[in-house]
Image (tube, rainbow, N blue to C red):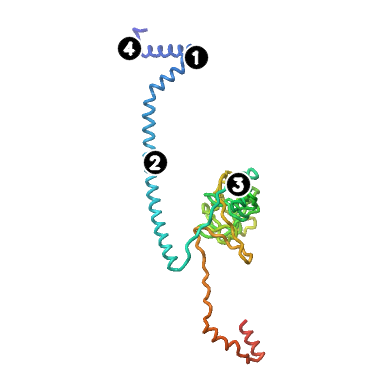
Amino acid sequence: MASILPPAERRSVVLVATYAALSLLLLVIGDHLPVSWMRGVGAFVFEPLDRFVLSGDRLFAAWRENGALHQRLTLLEIENSKLRTAGAENRELRARLGLPEWHGLSLKAVEVVALSDEPTPTAATLSAGADLGVKPGDALVTSDGLVGRVTEVWARGSRAALLTDPNLAVACEIETTGVNGVLRFSPSPTPRLLLSAVPLADTIRVGEDVMTSDLSLRFARGIPVGRVVRIRRDATGLMQEVEVRPRAMLSRLRHAFVVPGPVSASDGSLPRPRTEFEPVRTVVLPAPPGPSAVKAAAPATAKPATATPARADTTSGGRR
């Protein structure tokens, strides 16, 4: 056979026979080989190559991330410069108009001790109470947005109703268009937040942000609440039913902030709370009349009326 096959094919036959013999040998003694020792030798041999490849990959990833961060930093610097210019112009204009400066609200950091109800929590127990100035009616917010409202206060703790509480209603508006509605939680047929009382003529788009409106007497204006995810007609067909996804993860609350609510005035009314980015509205009252105006008006008031009753009725009737 060796004389019949050419040299190239004879080498192939020898290699195949060698590989077959090695395979049989490994099958027989494979279980008795020092696998850990062989792994150690392989790790020692290929470790420099692994380090070289990983270093190159990390260097490329760092270079790419550095470029993205540099671009973002440039955009943020430009935006920050625009905001500083706008802030300076705003202060100058408010000074010329005689309007007061902007003011802020104090935030009290609290820890969420427990969440009530599952799978959708409707209430949260807070670690702060009357000892830290928490009062019923205060708003509960996180860095993402509105979470709920404090309903019960104890000496060293409190309880807040979350947005998922069906008894909690929040007056909200669409950030871009200013469309107003009332946000409530609907547990059926599927748990969801719905912005109701929205006419069909109002334009709302999916993806727009929802925040507390100026019509709310319990929450400050401009607190982010959620984002529009679905729009449909309600059961009556006369209004829009807007589904809103909350910005804050209500099932993963750990820390939050308490925002002071409205303070009752002397006449018993509840003024609307304000946020730090909302200026105070001023009302200009007319100046009281001077002494000369009072003296001039005195003879007119003291002069007896000379009109007849019929003429007086005609005059009064004309004024109505």
Q: Which residue is mark 1?
A: 31
The amino acid type found where label 2 is placed reads Glu
Mark nearer the viewer, 2 or 3: 3
- Does dot 2 land on a helix, a strand or a loop? helix
Q: Position of residue 112 (x, y in %)?
A: 59, 45
Nearer to us of marks 4 and 3 is: 3
Neighbour tally class for label 4: few under 14, some 14-19, many 20 plus, Cα within 10 Å: few
Q: Quadrant of the N terminus?
A: top left
Q: Earlier in the sequence, mark 1 or mark 4?
A: 4
| Disc 4: which residue | 7
> Residue drawn 57% across and 44% down?
254
Q: Secondary structure at mark 3?
A: loop
| Disc 1 residue type (three-letter) | Asp
Please tell me whether mark 2 or mark 4 is closer to you in this view: 2
Mark with earlier residue (2, 4): 4
Element carrying mark 1? helix
Mark 4 and mark 2 in contact (Cβ < 8 Å)? Answer: no
Residue that mark 3 sits on: 127
Residue 58 vs 25, above or below: the answer is below
Residue type marked 3: Ser
**Callout 4, which amino acid?**
Pro
Work out how far the residue at label 3 is from the one at label 1, CA to CA, in angstroms: 61 Å
Q: CA distance from mark 2 to mark 4?
A: 57 Å
User: Of callouts 2 and 1, which one flags the residue occurring earlier in the amino acid sequence?
Assistant: 1
**Residue drawn where x is 46% and y is 18% of the image:** 36
**196 or 99: nearer the viewer:** 99
Q: Quadrant of the C terminus?
A: bottom right
